[in-house]
Image (cartoon, rainbow, N blue to C red):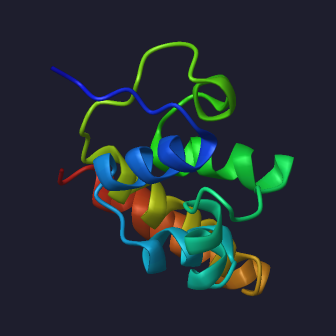
């Protein structure tokens, strides 16, 4: 029998755990402090912004409506959270690279795709 997450804090925590992320890893993906994630997961803590909710839903592979209201299906344990975290980290880091470097990186990734 599955426990139902009744509150926003419980749903954030459940989605994070099922995505295989620590509070620190989620915080890094969202560019916030680990303690901020801890506040979101506490019943008396503060709530995340809409922007953070959207980013969380992408990283943890759940819908925003499930996070906010518990509607839709609860998240299943999934390894895609780790992939989403890496993809988000790549995008975030790429904003600091010169275009010439990004062009080379994309070419490298396209060539590597042939061998996968």
The residue at the far top in this view is 72
To which quarter of the image does residue 102 belong?
Answer: bottom right
Rendered residue at 64%/62% (across/down): 40
Rendered residue at 84%/46% (across/down): 50
- 55 or 97, which lies in front? 55
Image location of residue 55, percent across then percent down: 68, 51
Rendered residue at 76%/86% (across/down): 96
Image location of residue 31, percent across then percent down: 69, 77
- 70 or 100, which lies in front? 70
Q: Which part of the image, by quadrant, shows the N terminus?
A: top left
Image location of residue 67, percent across then percent down: 60, 35
To which quarter of the image does residue 109 belong?
Answer: bottom left
Would residue 90 be visible to someone looking at this image? no
Above or below residue 26? Residue 54 is above
- 12 or 104, which lies in front? 12
Would residue 98 be visible to someone looking at this image? yes
Image location of residue 32, percent across then percent down: 69, 78
Q: Is residue 49 left or right of residue 63?
A: right
Rendered residue at 76%/56% (across/down): 47
Above or below residue 40? Residue 39 is below
The residue at the far front in this view is 44
Q: Is residue 107 left or right of residue 18?
A: right
- 91 or 112, which lies in front? 91
Q: Is residue 101 left or right of residue 48?
A: left
């Amino acid at each position: 029998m599955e426990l139902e997450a009744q509150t926003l804090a419980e749903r954030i925590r459940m989605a994070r755990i099922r995505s295989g992320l620590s509070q620190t890893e989620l915080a890094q993906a969202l560019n916030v402090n680990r303690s901020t994630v801890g506040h979101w997961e506490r019943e008396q803590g503060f709530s995340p912004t809409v922007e953070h909710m959207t980013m969380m839903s992408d990283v943890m592979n759940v819908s925003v409506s499930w996070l906010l209201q518990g509607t839709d299906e609860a998240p299943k344990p999934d390894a895609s959270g780790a992939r989403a975290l890496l993809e988000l980290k790549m995008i975030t880091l790429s904003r600091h690279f010169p275009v010439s470097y990004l062009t080379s990186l994309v070419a490298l990734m396209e060539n590597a795709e042939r061998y996968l």
